[in-house]
Image (cartoon, rainbow, N blue to C red):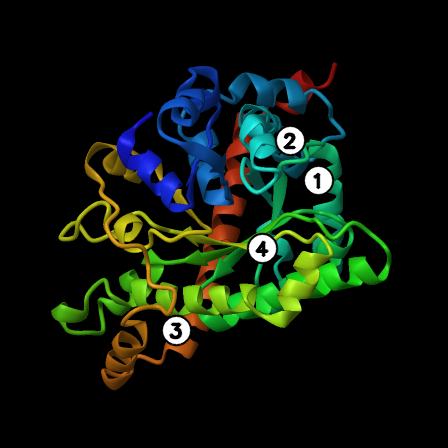
Amino acid sequence: MNPNTKALHQLGQSLWLDNITRRLLDDGTLASYIADLSVTGLTSNPTIFEHAIGHGNDYDTAITELARDRHSTIEQIFFALAIDDLQRAADLLRPAFDASDGVDGWVSLEVSPLLADDAPKTIEAAADLHATAARENLFIKIPGTAAGLAAIEASIFAGIPVNVTLLFSREQYLAAADAYLRGIERRIEAGLDPKVGSVASLFISRWDVAANKEVPKELHNRLGIAIAGVTYRAYRDLLASDRWQALADAGAQPQRLLWASTGTKDPAEPDTLYVKALAAPDTINTMPEKTLHAYADHGRASEPLAVDGGDADTVLQTFTQTGIDTDALAARLQREGAESFSGSWQALLKQIEAKCPPVAEATP
């Protein structure tokens, strides 16, 4: 086992891979990450699948076979491909799921980004996808938008594990956490099992990509970590609250805080910048492959992220003084993130459609 990645696990942080491709599954790479690099989970999104399906021919045969059913839509073909990959990944990670009593060992599948503002359809899609995938350790990813919050609560109440995606601030995180808690509280009131898995995914590096254009060089690449610091403090405060303790006493499982978008975007910074800064107990870091390899090679976890967020408040005050409105920027980043995933989704469906045989060939 790699000592650098193992040290993060010993600290209490889970390492998940922010990628999935059929080749990773077929050639044993994912299995080796699990065995050698302490990987205990995996996330996916429309951009990841767009790249996996559009750049190469690993899915071509499966697309042709699925297209022979002339009643299948392009979206249905995609979900069949994605679910097949994620079922295989979930099975590889099932030992981690069992060993941790459901805390770790998860994979994630996102609902269509086109549903981001439609709570009823998101609720329906989440239920259908989870039932079709038929894996206990599979999260359905739902964005933490206004409509998404209603869908998160309803899905948790229905017993569907949820990865809340596209969170960019402490306030957005707390809204997502509240939706999760309401869903669990409703289950307890209804006499249902309160143990339903969930994670809340806070995006980090996109803050710095946006802010670096607006602030002096000495403030570059500090905003994302500061946002993470105040959010981590809110997370720890919530876990210590009377409200959570009552649910924990009833058998509920914490919604874990997940650091997303942790690949370093600025070549002037260390390639393990966000991994080192965000080493924290009871959290997850989902890393691109490049970042995972970099940390395994030369990463070092020093002091864990302070429970009180360290100097995060001071750093955020400095950004405010330079004219950065973090509330407005968080809203913008969430909106842009949703738009980016929608764009990737549309491109993904076009790629699949282009790989489908002509109708005459597809009909038996």
Disc marking residue 329: 3
The amino acid pointed to by label 3 is Leu
161 vs 28, left or right, is right
Label 4 residue SS: loop
Label 2 residue SS: helix
Which of the two residues, 166 or 15, is positioned nearer the viewer here? 15
Label 3 residue SS: helix
Which mark sits nearer the N-terminus, 1 or 2? Answer: 2
Which one is in front in this view, the residue at disc 1 or the one at disc 2? 1
Whole-percent x, y for residue 4 in the image: 27, 35
Which one is in front in this view, the residue at disc 2 or the one at disc 4? 4
Disc marking residue 255: 4
The Cα atoms of the two marked residues, 1 and 2, are separated by 16 Å
The Cα atoms of the two marked residues, 4 and 1, are separated by 18 Å
How many C-alpha atoms fall within 10 Å of the one at disc 4: few (<14), some, or many (≥20)?
many
Q: Which residue is mark 2?
A: 77
